[in-house]
Amino acid sequence: MGETLNIPPEETPRHVAIIMDGNGRWALSRGKPRLAGHRAGTENLRRIIRASADFNVEYLTIYAFSTENWRRPPAEVQGLMHIMEDVIDRELNELNDEGVRLRHLGRLDKLAPKLRKKVRHAVELTKENNRLNLNIAFNYGGRDEIVYAVQNIIRAGVKADDVTVEMMSNYLFTAGMPDPDLIIRTSGELRTSNFLIWQSAYSEWYITPTYWPDFDREEYAKALKTFGQRDRRYGGIDEKYYE
Ligand code: IPE
Ligand code: IPE
Ligand code: MG
């Protein structure tokens, strides 16, 4: 483990979510195939997971494959599926030893049985860990998540008037977790791309032109420090402005 950050705990985000974007352009800019970019992105993820634990982030959620990413050419989709399997095979024991609790956000049913099994095993193996909660959004879409929640609420026989914001939150894949305080998007796009659209209602955003494979510990520390300077109002006003 490396150095910690010198920011007070109350200014540290409990939950950081990252849209790991720009792998393709990173590869293109080096004359490499897109999958080389995805592999480099995975290497970077290792660093950011360790940094998150060092920086006392409690929850790290990463967007690895969206419900819309199935639209990519089959070879790229296959490549991403293999990378996911590979990451579990290579990293699981070390992450477990480091006290990382892995969870999956999204639907497992569309994934190949082998990958589904590996994901379930990883979640089960690490369920008692509490050093860092790592959520992997894979085959995840915010709209799909909300539809799935509504279906389950209806299936449970809940009456229309009993549906509340809290109940909806408890039917999402993130049930029981705090909403993300900070969402980081690399590679400069100014959109959510269907990531945590319910949970991000009051998240702070940090968007950087840096491509994901180049988003290093230093820039991560900078993102966390800028978060500490934000004035979160949640629709209200600070007491100092009261008349
Ligand atoms: C993000 O990188 C990773 C995934 C979406 C799986 P991209 O593959 O979207 O990279 P760009 O946006 O094409 O550069
Ligand atoms: C968002 O990136 C999905 C992930 C990072 C997994 P995309 O590259 O798919 O987003 P768009 O298509 O540019 O909006
Ligand atoms: Mg992209």
Image (tube, helix red, strand yellow):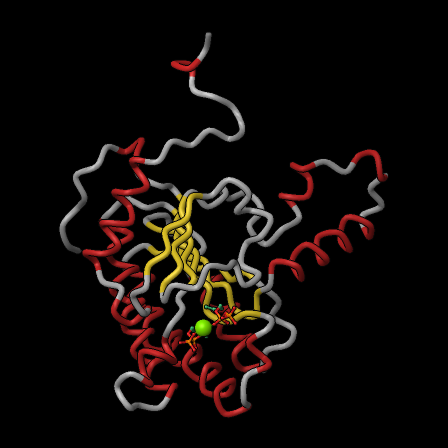
The x, y position of residue 49, in whole percent, is 30, 59
Q: Is residue 70 left or right of residue 95?
A: right
Establish if 184 lies above or below 4: below
Q: Is residue 95 left or right of residue 59?
A: left
Q: Nearer the viewer, residue 52 or 24?
A: 24
Q: Nearer the viewer, residue 68 or 240?
A: 240
Q: Residue at x 61, y 58 (%)?
A: 142
Q: Residue at x 42, y 54 (%)?
A: 17
Establish if 104 lies above or below 166: below
The x, y position of residue 48, in whole percent, is 28, 60
Q: Residue at x 42, y 32 (%)?
A: 232
Q: Residue at x 47, y 21 (%)?
A: 237
Which residue extends farthest front? 243
Q: Nearer the viewer, residue 237 or 135?
A: 237
Q: Is residue 201 left or right of residue 8?
A: right
Which residue extends farthest top? 243
Q: Is residue 154 left or right of residue 103?
A: right
Establish if 131 lies above or below 237: below
The x, y position of residue 203, in whole percent, is 47, 43
Q: Quadrant of residue 240?
A: top left
The x, y position of residue 79, in whole percent, is 45, 87
